[in-house]
Image (cartoon, helix red, strand yellow):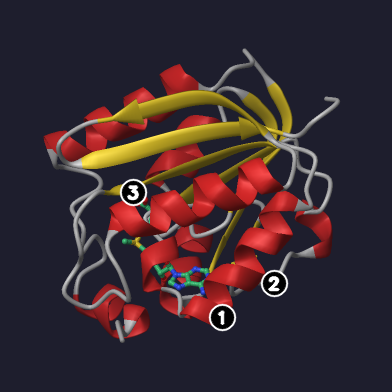
Amino acid sequence: MADFDLLYRTDPDPFRVGSSWYEQRKIDIVLACLPRPRYRLAWDAAAGTGHLAARLAGRCDRVIATDASTTAITALQAHGFDECFRSTLPALPASAAGADLVIVSEVLYYLTADERAATLAVLAGMTADTVCVQWRHHPHDAQLSGADAQAEFDTAMGAGGHQRLVQHGEPDFLLSVFRAGGV
Ligand SMILES: C[S@@+](CC[C@H](N)C(=O)[O-])C[C@H]1O[C@@H](n2cnc3c(N)ncnc32)[C@H](O)[C@@H]1O
């Protein structure tokens, strides 16, 4: 199991989110795939280094950035993020419950089957545009591949009555956007 606190203590950007073309381009694609021009409240549920959360700030009135790693959250606070705090999926922080945009980026495959099921139940219970994006392959320290985790997400959101608005696939990553029914 990945020790993210150790990873972030060793290297503040262990996944090269701030420097790799793959990550920079992926963030641009996530932003391009958001169906609405603006959102009231976004929740980035595993914000990591906060690069995506920072970009979301340009499209959202408020952005709540959470992560399971205390080290990552301490770094986000040091970079001046107003609304960031430690929270571990499947928990839904009270302040994020009313989000109209939820981002789940590169995290589902690290969760155990029980944690994924509980997380997907939380996401399917929200009234938001929900974006799930992840590397298609199987990280060495993950529970399953991104392709399998993405399939679980797509199935759970569909079964929860959410409508798929975007499906984007590349050799290296997959992205889905679902909207809650009746919104
Ligand atoms: C590969 S990084 C992705 C970070 C960011 N979402 C991105 O796409 O750049 C995985 C992140 O998930 C966080 N994480 C792992 N398990 C988590 C959980 N149960 N709840 C919230 N965050 C978690 C880690 O601390 C880490 O920051």
Q: Which residue is mark 3?
A: 134
Question: x, y percentage for residue 70?
Answer: 49, 78
Query: Is ligand 1 within 8 Å of the beta carbon of the residue shown at mark 3?
Result: yes
Looking at the image, residue 66 lies above or below residue 70: above
Residue type at mark 2?
A: Ala
Q: Which mark is residue 91?
A: 2
Classed neighbour count for the residue bearing mark 2: other residues with Cα under 10 Å, few (<14), some (14–19), many (≥20): few
**Residue 86 in view of the camera:** no
CA gap, disc 3 and disc 2 = 20 Å
Question: x, y percentage for residue 120?
Answer: 62, 60
Task: Name the one closer to the observer, 19 or 142.
Answer: 142
The residue sitting at 24% across, 44% down in the picture is 18
Residue type at mark 1?
A: Asp
CA gap, disc 1 and disc 2 = 13 Å
Determine the secondary structure under disc 3. Answer: strand
Image check: 95 left or right of 70?
A: right
* Quadrant location of the N terminus in the rendered image: bottom left
Determine the secondary structure under disc 1. Answer: helix
Residue 58 lies in quadrant: top right
Q: Which residue is mark 1?
A: 114
The label nearer to you, 1 versus 2, is 1
The residue sitting at 68% across, 47% down in the picture is 159
**Residue 2 in view of the camera:** yes
Residue type at mark 3?
A: Gln
Question: x, y percentage for residue 31?
Answer: 45, 24
